[in-house]
Image (cartoon, helix red, strand yellow):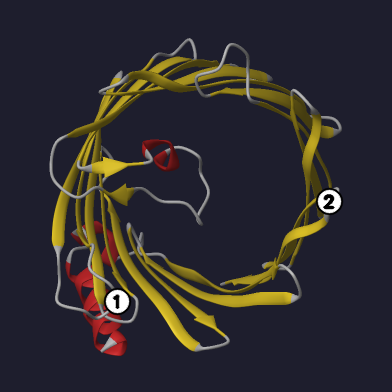
Amino acid sequence: MKKNLTMLAVLAAVALLPAGTMGEEFRFGGSLGLEFTFTPVPPADLDISSDITLSLSFGNAQVISRTRLTLDGFHQAWLGFGLDLSVLHLETAMRFDPCFSMYRLEVRGEWCPAEFGGLLLLENLAPICEPPDYTVGVVLDLGLQLTSGFWLRSLTGFGVWDLYYLVDELARTDISAAPGWWFEEQLLGMGLQAECFSVDSWILFTDLGLIWARLSSSYSWSQPDVAVGASLWWSGGWMFDTAELFVSGTIHPVTLRSVTVFDLSGFVMQEIDVEVTFSGITIYSQTVFDFLGLIQQVAGIELRF
């Protein structure tokens, strides 16, 4: 079934390409990635999973397939398709674990300086491969991007939770569906992006009021390629809950990044990222630990063609 879905997505990508891309402007490329995740489970167990990711691009269209395997066998498959039409960007995706469990359709457009978008989510809340219990969620996305670097963004969720996962730029996080269809969350962001520094803030509202906020800033240098920054996280107390300090630097072909997390009692955890890129190959690792030991280890390789 997954093979048929992949073939249909590829054929759809080619069929939907603008006519100009089928000539001299047609571009074909892609990547193949393999990632392993090791998570210790106290007192003496280890959870191991692997993700196989295949990405193919045809001009302005892209097809992405991601399959997750565990020690018990097949765990989850995710198939996505994207189409970039300059002022309009379309993304659609399906998830199987192993039965069908999610479908999403996302549309984003630009009308300078305004940005607008919407996301439709259909998710099955029933246990795996049991009689389905579908729910629908919608996210409305509005933004403003000025030439000065100042930006505003508003995301309103109906029937979905975890709106912050739409802007955290992490592949492992995603929004989740709520049982029913009503207002759930409002995420508001604003910031300033300059050539060498940036500052931004995000606040989250529910029907109970303000429940979460994050304030971040960073500064970067081009020679050498180094960036430093900090984030403060708040979730309802009289002071911030956690603070993150990060430092990253690149000496080709190696990139290092360190993220240290603190709270009011002191050190919480440390994340060390290492990435090596050469000849279309990227090898990377992510290590997360605290005073008690390893929390998670991720290692992967990606081949681009």
x, y (%) of residue 151? 42, 17
Query: For the residue labelled by badge 1, is the local secondary structure a helix, a strand or a loop?
Result: loop
Instruction: From the image, state whether disc 2 or disc 1 is nearer to you.
Output: 1
Viewer-nearest residue: 172 or 28: 172
Q: Is residue 94 above or below residue 256?
A: below
Q: Quadrant of the C terminus?
A: bottom right
Q: If you read the primary sequence from the N terminus, does the residue marked by circle 2 or circle 1 appear first?
A: 1
Q: Does dot 2 land on a helix, a strand or a loop?
A: loop
Q: Is residue 47 above or below residue 160?
A: below
Number of numbered discs: 2
Crowding at mark 1 (Cα within 10 Å: few <14, some 14-19, many 20+): some
Q: Give the labeled residue for mark 1.
A: 128
Q: CA distance from mark 2 to mark 1?
A: 45 Å
Answer with the quarter of the image where residue 259 lies.
Answer: top right
Q: Position of residue 44 (x, y in %)?
A: 76, 75
> Tag 2: residue type?
His
Q: With respect to residue 140, does 10 lie above or below?
A: below
Residue 160, label in figure: none
Image check: 238 left or right of 252?
left
> Where residue 301 sits in the image (x, y, percent)?
68, 71
The answer to whether the residue labelled 2 contacts the one labelled 1, judged by CB atoms less than 8 Å apart, is: no
Name which residue type carries label 1: Ile
Q: Position of residue 172 (x, y in %)?
A: 51, 57
**Closer-to-camera residue (61/265):** 265
Q: Crowding near pointer 2: few (<14 within 10 Å), some, many (20+)?
A: few
At 51% from the left and 18% from the top, the residue drawn is 201
In the picture of the structure, the residue carrying the numbered disc 2 is 252
The quadrant of the picture occupied by the N terminus is bottom left
Determine whether 218 is above or below 268 in the image: above
